[in-house]
């Protein structure tokens, strides 16, 4: 491969970098999803999470966009959903504090 011109200028995003990993008190960790994201009800799932202990098959846990980082303790909307005949179906949704976030 040979570059025949100058490279484009880097993008400069406004605001802090998003978290690339978050962790909760129960040990569950979540990472940003890439590509197409699930829409569960009116919630866009931005992070995919490790399965919870005893989580049923075809059931998923994710975090709705955006994370709430306005105070010293960050919060996330943790969503549990399953595959349904007409797309993802909401099982539960709760606002939970984040223990650690890496960015």
Image (cartoon, rainbow, N blue to C red):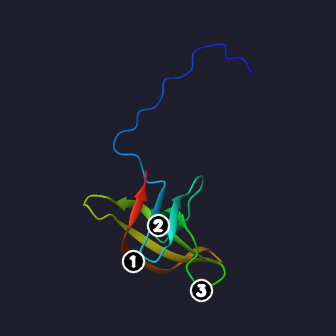
Pointer 3 and pointer 1: residues touching (CB < 8 Å)?
A: no
Residue for badge 1: 94
In this view, the mark in front (3 or 1): 3
Cα distance in 3D space between marks 2 and 1? 10 Å
Identify the element where label 1 is drawn. Answer: strand
Tell which residue pokes out farthest to the left in this image.
71
Identify the element where label 2 is drawn. Answer: strand
- Give x and y (percent) for residue 39: 52, 65
Cα distance in 3D space between marks 3 and 1? 18 Å
Q: Is residue 83 left or right of residue 9?
A: right
Of callouts 3 and 1, which one flags the residue occurring earlier in the amino acid sequence? 3
Tell which residue pokes out farthest to the right in this image.
1
Image point (59%, 83%), residue name: 55
- Give x and y (percent) for residue 29: 51, 67
Identify the element where label 3 is drawn. Answer: loop
Cα distance in 3D space between marks 3 and 2? 19 Å
Quadrant in which the N terminus is drawn: top right
Q: Is residue 22 above or below residue 51?
A: above
Image point (59%, 56%), residue name: 36
Of callouts 2 and 1, which one flags the residue occurring earlier in the amino acid sequence? 2
Classify residue 81 by image quadrant. Answer: bottom right
Image point (53%, 23%), residue name: 8
**Residue 3 numbered tag:** none
Q: Is residue 99 above or below residue 3?
A: below
In this view, the mark in front (3 or 2): 3
Q: Is residue 65 left or right of residue 49?
A: left
Q: Residues within 10 Å of mark 3 (few under 14, many from 20)?
A: few
Residue for badge 2: 63
Q: Residues within 10 Å of mark 1 (few under 14, many from 20)?
A: few
Q: Is residue 5 left or right of residue 40?
A: right
Pointer 3 and pointer 2: residues touching (CB < 8 Å)?
A: no
Residue for badge 3: 54
């Amino acid at each position: 491969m040979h570059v025949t011109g100058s490279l484009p200028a880097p993008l400069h995003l406004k605001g802090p970098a998003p978290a690339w990993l978050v962790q909760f008190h129960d040990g569950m960790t979540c990472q940003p999803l890439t590509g197409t994201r699930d829409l569960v009800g009116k919630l866009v799932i931005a992070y995919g999470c490790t399965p919870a202990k005893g989580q049923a098959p075809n059931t998923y846990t994710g975090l709705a966009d955006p994370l709430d980082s306005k105070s010293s303790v960050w919060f996330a909307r943790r969503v549990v959903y399953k595959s349904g005949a007409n797309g993802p179906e909401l099982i539960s949704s709760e606002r939970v504090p984040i223990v650690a976030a890496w960015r």
